[in-house]
Image (cartoon, rainbow, N blue to C red):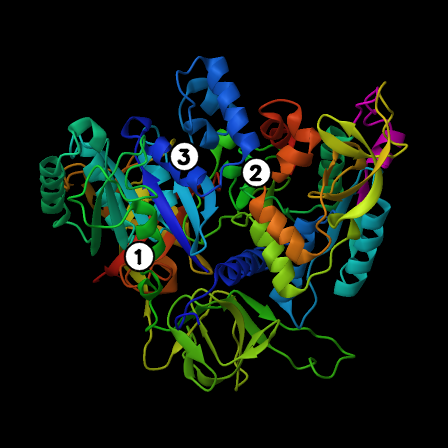
Amino acid sequence: MAAPYELSHLRALEAEAIHIIREVAAEFERPALLFSGGKDSIVMLHLAAKAFAPARVPFPVMHVDTGHNFAEVIAFRDLMVAQVGVRLVVASVEDDLAAGRVADDEGPRASRNRLQTITLLRGIEEQRYDAVFGGARRDEEKARAKERVFSFRDDFGQWDPKNQRPELWSLYNGRHKQGEHIRVFPLSNWTELDIWQYISDEGIELPAIYFAHTRKVFRRDGMWMDDSELIPRLPGEEVEERVVRFRTVGDVTCTGAVDSPAANLAEVIAEVAATRLTERGATRADDRISEAGMEDRKREGYF
Amino acid sequence: MEMLRLATAGSVDDGKSTLIGRLLYDSKAIFDDQLEAVERTSRERGDEYTNLALLTDGLRAEREQGITIDVAYRYFATPKRKFIIADTPGHTQYTRNMVTGASTADVALILIDARKGVLEQSRRHAFLASLLGIPHLVLCVNKMDLVDWSEERFEEIKHEFRSFAMKLDVHDLTFIPVSALLGDNIVDRSTNMPWYEGSALLHHLEEVHIASDRNLIDARFPVQYVIRPQNQTDRTTHDYRGYAGQVAGGVFRTGDEVVVLPSGFTSTIASIDTADGAIGEAFSPMSVTLRLADEIDISRGDMIARRKNQPHVGQDIEAMVCWMSEVSWLREGAKLAIKHTTRWARALVKDLQYQLDINTLHRHEDAVGLALNEIGRVTLRTTLPLFYDEYRRNRTTGSFILVDETTNTTVGAGMILAPASE
């Protein structure tokens, strides 16, 4: 039994995240929550629902849609949005493509990852959001390890890692001028394992692709890529059926699956606890651009 | 499983990165792909050894210049505890970063090179740890292998440090002789120092008692947000009015007689709500929603406390302030925004009593201002009353930040000492 007045690490992380989410609702005029249908954004939306119960979540969710989605994830997104009762705003990369604001990369390794940033910033500007929640965690990536909970973005949505505001105690400074905004990361102190244990504790539902299933895939850069018509094959890339699951969920063209027999939460938790690879290292092509791939994208306004 | 926040201070020369690297590696918190990336970069840079500092120096500029610019957060867990390390750089912006990392820490880890002994830097680390109210201080005397595992040398350093620490507000001081490079007394007890009878570092971090560090006596609830569903169709929540916040001290129970500040109205707690249902009691740092028996006008920035145990209420406070701006000074007459718990106000710097030299603890009473990384004692007058406790009694209701109203950046961190006399 826990000692009196002791809070488990998951409950302490939950209390911290709820505190952060409420600070934003109280101090900003137009916040929004970035929702991709991935596990971190699902946990974040779950926490937002808990923060304001029995009232509704007092801000909308925004999905930056690359148009390259896993169908299961989009279906799940719509279901969850309806369950929680929040308004969904979709900012679509395809709108920016159609309007000629951006152009697709060419070739078999083309990705819309960088284009997302343009769409995200356009969405924020059009909707006049002054605070945007993201599900990023500091344990994910070394540039993110330096990120504040309240992260200031200038008129261009840029992050300046060398000039961040000191952040002390739980006193967050969200002051900004018109046109600037704050990115807010309530899951900063959570690890991948914390996320999974919390999902298990709370009985949170996830898209099925997080669990082991049989899928047609092909090998590229050490990852199993989905046999999707959105990814042109390179010579020698053969499609095969394997039992896999996804550790992260993003754009189809840059998210790889891993071999895994973990078909339920207990098995996933055991697998995550024993893994020797980070989730982004194992499954994200977008981080492999360069050693500072994440930092460079974050400077441009990526989340 | 409990969570422990650890702040480390020191520079690469002390072996700090090696020590953190070893803690992370031995607890399997460094992954193979991270290690490979670090090994690759080390080779490319021509380092003679795998430079574990690269694990935390995540920014391009940091790797290019070989320095740490900002606080990095690292995570690891053992079956007993989850640990958050705030790793603060040793040189540039030292004070600002250490104060940031230390503000929420339960334990401060300070490294001393056994060959060099207690340096000015070690004293500075210890002083900041005590100023920020970190309850536990662990002094790792590192590189014991280079002093022949000498008990005498260890005792000498211990004695020297203790006599300095007596001047500080440090309650729990632990000394551990280690070799971070060889792993002695980090995860496993050293066989090279049989004379040392204490725990290895990791074991100490797993066992140090932190639950009673929280203030469980003075019940404090800064109101963060008012929850009113205003759902016309749902009769169960139609009249719901709850005050959401995070408990900042003490224990609240259903039925407790409470006072609401600043109005002074009293009521009783009708219910302590969470999304998982009502609970009988709430304590720090739980985020809950309080409902009161009486309808009182309460808004964000107000404070709920026990009727018979109330915080100070006032607009004149004495505080230690650490100044963090690169471009401006803190001077008498300055006007700044202040955030204290959930309340924003404006503050006037009425008096700078002295600037404290953090190396010698000398008070410079003739100081005309505080520059970047300087610490001093000030008297502030605020536009609204604050509901506060002394920082040493409560780190949440005793702390505040100062914000420049033109640039909106955070320029000062404050720790309240007492109400100011008129």
Q: Which residue is mark 2?
A: A276
Residue A286 seen in the current view: yes
Residue type at numbered disc 3: Gly
Q: Quadrant of the N terminus of chain A?
A: bottom left
Which type of secondary structure does the marked residue at label 1 adopt?
loop
The spot of residue B290 in percent (x, y) is 52, 76
The magenta stretch spans which residues? A90-111
Q: Is residue B374 left or right of residue B247?
A: left
Q: Kindly report the distance in space between the C-alpha atoms of the residues bearing marks 3 and 1.
A: 21 Å
Check residue A48 for magenta coloring.
no
Which type of secondary structure does the marked residue at label 2 adopt?
loop
Q: Quadrant of residue A203?
A: bottom right
Q: Which residue is mark 3?
A: B21
Asked if labels 1 and 2 share a chain, the reply is no
Q: Which residue is mark 1?
A: B208
Which type of secondary structure does the marked residue at label 3 adopt?
helix
Q: Is residue A178 left or right of residue A4?
A: right
Q: Are marks 3 and 1 in contact (CB under 8 Å)?
A: no
**What is the chain letter for disc 1?**
B
**What is the chain letter for disc 2?**
A
Q: Nearer the viewer, mark 3 or mark 2?
A: 2
